[in-house]
Image: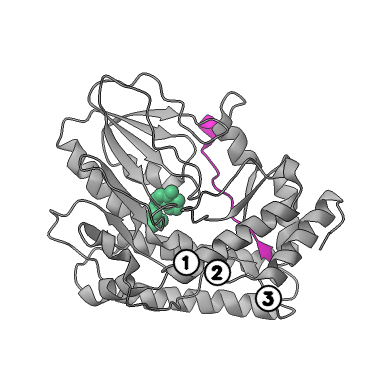
Amino acid sequence: MKKLDNIGGEFESSYNTSSKKLLKKFNNGTWFTCGRHALNEIFIHINKQQVKNIYIPIYTCKSIELILRKFEFKVFYYDIDHNFKNKLKKIKKNSAVLLMNYFGIKENFKLNNNDCKPIIINDLSHSFLQEKLSFKKDEFYFFSLRKFGVFNYGGWCNISNTKNRIYDTRNISTFSQKIRKIKQKYLNTNSQPSLIKEKKILKIFKEFDQKLYDLKHPIKKNNLKIIQKIDIKKSFKIRRDNFNYLKNKLPKRYTLNFKLNAHDIPLGFFLFLKNRNQLRNNLNLNRIFCPIHWDISTQFQSKKNFSSLLSKQILTIPIDQRYDQTHLDKIIININQFLNKPFKK
Ligand SMILES: Cc1ncc(COP(=O)(O)O)c(C=O)c1O
């Protein structure tokens, strides 16, 4: 590891391809530039099916909200428990329920027995890589491709009657590569983080995000061909090994009760602690950049729901294919220093 190596942050636009076509199970359906468009397509579809109410987890990302606002569903928010299971009880008639598998580890996909048989929408953004994934005929599925570093953009849903519209990604590729270069240059040349420069970079990333959402001109099957050939299998083992390494080395009282099943491909490792923000700032200073899943909207920030507590206290530690034991030891040393714990090899 070089002295100035960073841990975390956006993925580069590089990828390996494989003949195995691991994403081929998503051939039937429609590809978009991002997950938001895929969810939008599902909402258009269920809107035509008399759906009036929609149940959304409090604990989810804000971009879901952006799409919801375009429709006139009556929205009910639901909480999850410490095992990330939904606390849904009674569901009204003519409803749809959005469920998700958190971090590729914690399933939220089972509903209690329910007379009203809601329409189920599964957000697979954290679990589309799972090898055992199976689809039910009458349920909807979608995901954002970019969470696992498979690719910098892309989204899919299992509705295929949109004439397989694929949105052009050429401009996006160029823009995406450009902003990653700017960020890399900043990170490699500044030994001390600069808040002003970081704000500028975040602004460019936001613009990129908006561009993904705004882009709406169809073409380019070639991009889909690339996506389908991406070799994602290599990363599976690394993610699992890195996850288990951190689980064994970090103090148990801060690590939540996460256990990997044989088919799980974890998105990250998680810490759960009151002074999360201080730890995050501290890690930033040491060039370890950890995302927060997620800052939920202020209307839900209450002591009564677990989602709110999670949002305030969870920190996602990067464990992806870019990192080996040297990186992980650096993470552990820094976290232990913050927690006043000795580092054990
Ligand atoms: C769980 C989840 N679902 C869907 C989305 C939307 O995906 P995209 O950003 O590709 O539009 C996100 C985005 O952050 C997400 O975290």
Whole-angstrom CA distance, mark 3 to mark 1, is: 18 Å
209, 308: nearer the viewer? 308
Eyeballing the image, is 189 above or below 62?
below
Q: For the residue labelled by badge 2, is the local secondary structure a helix, a strand or a loop?
A: loop
Task: Report the residue marked by disc 3.
Answer: 5
Eyeballing the image, is 119 above or below 103?
above
**Amino acid bearing label 3:** Asp
Instruction: Give how far across and how far down residue 305 sits, in percent.
Output: 56, 27
For residue 149, the mark is: 1
Count neighbours of disc 1 (C-alpha within 10 A) and say few if under 14, some if 14 to 19, many if 20 or more. many
330, 183: nearer the viewer? 330
Q: Magenta segment range? A: 288-300
The residue lying at 87 percent from left, 51 percent from top is: 340
Instruction: Give how far across and how far down residue 203 sits, in percent.
Output: 52, 63
Task: Report the residue marked by disc 2.
Answer: 321
Q: Is residue 123 left or right of residue 181?
A: left
Give the farthest residue toward the front. 262
Whole-angstrom CA distance, mark 2 to mark 1, is: 9 Å
Residue 227 position by quadrant: bottom left
Q: For the residue labelled by badge 3, is the local secondary structure a helix, a strand or a loop?
A: loop
In primary-sequence order, the first of circles 2 and 3 is: 3
